[in-house]
Amino acid sequence: MRVYRRKDSPYYWTSGTAKGRRYRRSTGETQKKLAEGAAARIHGEEMARPGRKDSWRLTDCIGTYWHDHGQHQKSSDFIWTKICAIERNLDVNAAMAGLTNAQLLEYRARRRGEGVGGATINRDLAILKAALNHAALMHGQVAPAIAWKKLRYSENEIRVRFLSIEEYQALIEAADKDMAFAILAAVATGLRKTSMLDLKWHQVDLSAKAITIPRGKGKRPQVVRIAEALRYELLARRKRSGYVFLRGNFRKRWEAARAAAGIEDFHWHDLRHTFGSWARQGGADLLDIMDAMGHSSSAVTMRYAHVDPETHVTAFDRAGQKLSRSVSRDDSKTA
């Protein structure tokens, strides 16, 4: 176990061996003495983790998934919430390999008893499945045979709720200045909440009218064009560094604005749906919307297919226009 500095990090790092397994982690400390204390704690955590030859319990499986993967994701808060639900409603001290479909049916019933819907339970099961697969693929454990597809609840048709112009104006007027700025940006860019709140000024290029959103390994960054109304607000608020949007009490301020505007059955993510729906109404092609929203599959973008453009021209109209021009040319030749 040792602590050392890396060129690409302001923190001390530690590395060592626990149960025959090498590890290397950041201590999160910039002072050496504090880093040494953190290194000892990390070594203890690594020693507490099960080794490759040990018989894992569900708690070992879930804990290892969190340490190896979950805590490093942008969706870590979501993953942690799911892990807490699993630990609360499932016997995590039982053997991982002994998990049965019957136990997961009981888990679903307990979650239903908490007033949770089928879609939420499906997300719980997805995280549990990911943890089991991680233990099998990365740590050589035997995963139980689970009928995941049969355990899933059938979900309702994907919900698309978006603002009318009148609702949008009411929401902007009801919100405080910083929240109104965030709402404008969400509708103008279609960015997910996490990407917006993590946005920093160095990612905003006002001269090129573009925002760059970094992605994971092997994926190109997403480039978002800045609409003129948003550019005006960004220019007025421009700083050299730091976060673009005010993050403190964000949810509380959002809920206050929504309630004051009298808008029901509407969530923050629906502002993203508003971007997609308004783009479609403006005549944007579905492939353009897919690219703008950073969807990995066209199947996700198809939720906007039913939103008719305000100046809707059908395939029949376009073919008919071609045919009409062809007939007109033939008539002119005859004359």
Image (spheres, rainbow, N blue to C red):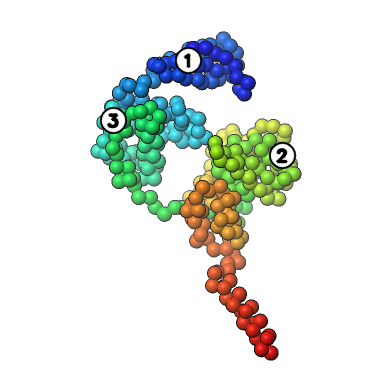
Q: Nearer the viewer, mark 2 or mark 3?
A: 3
Residue highlighted by disc 1: 16
Three-letter amino acid code of the residue under disc 2: Arg
First along the sequence among labels 3 and 1: 1
Amino acid type, callout 3: Ala
Q: Nearer the viewer, residue 229 or 79?
A: 79
Marks 3/1: CA–CA distance: 29 Å
Amino acid type at image mark 1? Gly
Cα gap from disc 2 to disc 1, whole angstroms: 47 Å
Q: Is residue 153 left or right of residue 196?
A: left
Q: Which residue is mark 2?
A: 237
Q: Quick one: label 1, few (<14), some, or many (20+) residues within 10 Å?
A: some
The numbered dot on residue 97 is 3
Badge 3 crowding class, 10 Å Cα cut-off, few under 14, some 14 to 19, many 20 or more, is some
Q: In the depicted view, which residue is nearer to us: 229 or 127?
A: 127
Q: Judging from the image, what secondary structure is the residue with disc 3 in? A: helix
Percent from the top left, x then y, of residue 181? 65, 43
In percent of the image, x 57 and y 63: which residue is there?
A: 309
Among numbered discs 2 and 1, the one appearing first in the sequence: 1
Select label 3 or label 1 by which is in front: 1
Q: Residue 287 at x, y = what percent?
A: 56, 56
